[in-house]
Amino acid sequence: RLLLQAWQKGKALDPTQGWLQVEVKREGPRWALLGSSEFPGLARAAGALLEAAGFRPLENRVRLLPDGAAGNPPYGVFRAARALTWARPGEASGLSAADGPGQVEETELLFGDPLRVLDKQKGFLLVHAASGYLGWVEEKAVLRCSEKRFLSLLAAPRALFLKSYRRGDVEVPAGAALPFRGKKGDLVLLETPRGGILPVPSRWVKLSDPSRGEAAAALALSALGTPYLFGGRDREEGIDCSGLVQACWAAQGVRLPRDARMQVLCGRLVGWKGKWEALRPGDVLFFMNRWGRISHVALSLGGSRFVHATPPEVTVGSLDPADPWYTSTARRFVLAKRIRL
C-alpha cells in the first residue's frame, strides 16, 4: 500500500486529474490488484509497478470507470447553486476535515458545471468536474444529460460570472460559467443546466475568446518541421513538446508551466480517451507513459488532429485511427484541457 501511495504522490498523474483507488491483496499463490480507475493507463501502470516490485503473479482486476454502475448516460450538469464534493461517498454536507476523521472536502461545484459521472454509492455520485477535480457529490444535485448535449456544453464558448446573479428561482454564484448561446441587445443569452436560456446583462459576465486558441494553434502550425530538441524552447531552431505548447500560449499572453506534468493542472477538462468531438483549436492534449506519468503534450487543431513536437521534428498527428495522420502516440492520449474559459 505504501508503495502505491508513494507512486501516486510522486510519479503518477496528479490524483486531482484522474481517479485511481486501488489496493493489492494476496489470494493464495497469487496477488490481485483491486479497486477502480478512470483511465486504463493508470490501472496498467499500477500493475506494472507492482510486478516490477516482485508482486508476481499478479491479476489486474481493477474496475474501469464509468462501467454502468452509476447509470447511463454517464454525463451530467450541476444544477444547485453550489456544493462541496467529498473524498468518500456519504459524507454529510457542511462538514469539514475539522469535524472528524473521514470528513474531507475536495472542491466546490458551481451552477452549470459539466460533470463526467464515474460511479455511484449511497446516494452520492463520483464525478470528474470540468475544473479537473474529482469527488463525491449528492446525486440529487446532478441533472443527467445525453452525450450529445454534454459534448455541446464542453465545446461552447462560456461566460464567466464576475458577481453572483439572481433571476426568478435561478441563482448563479460568482465564478460560475455557463455556455454562451448569443446576444440580444445588451443581454447575453446563456444556457442553464435544464437547457433553458438565461438572459444576463453583459456587464455581469466575461466571455471566453476562442480566437486566442485559434491563434495558438496557428502558431504551432507555423513551427512544422522545426527540429525536436529536448529542453528546447525556440520555435525556429529546436523545441520540445511542452516548450511548443508553452511558447504558443505565451504569444497569446498566457504563461503556462514549463513541463507537461505541470501543464496538465491548468485549464478545463474538455476531452478524454475516445472523446475528442468537443476539442477546439488551442486545446492542450496530454499523453501518459507506461508508469502513469504525463510525459507528452500537444496542441489541438480541433477535433482529432493536433500539432506536437516529437523526434525528429514538429509534426501533425491525429487521435482517429481512420485518419491518415494517425500516430501511435495517440494510444497514450488520456485527457485534454481548454486554457481559455
Image: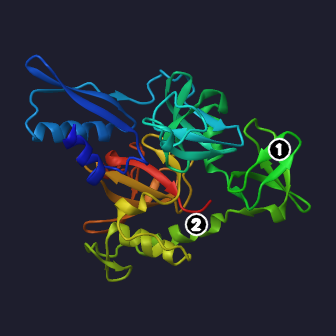
Asked if residue 274 is positioned above or below residue 266 in the image, the reply reads above
Seen at 49% across and 44% down, the residue is: 98
Q: Position of residue 110 (x, y in %)?
A: 66, 46
Which mark's residue is nearer the viewer, 1 or 2?
1
Q: Are marks 1 and 2 in contact (CB under 8 Å)?
A: no
In the rendered image, the quadrant that contains the N terminus is top left
Q: Quadrant of residue 274?
A: top left
Q: Is residue 11 left or right of residue 15?
A: left
Asked if residue 271 is positioned above or below residue 338 in the image, the reply reads above
Q: Position of residue 229 (x, y in %)?
A: 26, 74
For the question of whether residue 155 can be seen, the reply is yes
At label 2, the amino acid type is Glu
Q: Position of residue 79 (x, y in %)?
A: 70, 37
The circle drawn on residue 14 is none
Seen at 41% across and 61% down, the residue is: 298
Number of disc labels: 2
Q: Quadrant of residue 268?
A: bottom right
Q: Residues within 10 Å of mark 1 (few under 14, many from 20)?
A: some
Seen at 26% across and 43% down, the residue is: 5
The circle drawn on residue 197 is 1
Asked if residue 187 is positioned above or below residue 101 in the image, the reply reads below
At label 1, the amino acid type is Ile
Q: Is residue 145 left or right of residue 242?
A: right
Seen at 23% across and 41% down, the residue is: 4
Q: Measure the alpha-carbon separation of dots 1 and 2.
A: 27 Å
Q: Position of residue 162 (x, y in %)?
A: 74, 62
Q: Residues within 10 Å of mark 2 (few under 14, many from 20)?
A: some
Extreme top residue here?
28
Sequence-wise, the earlier of marks 1 and 2 is 1
Q: Which residue is mark 2?
A: 214
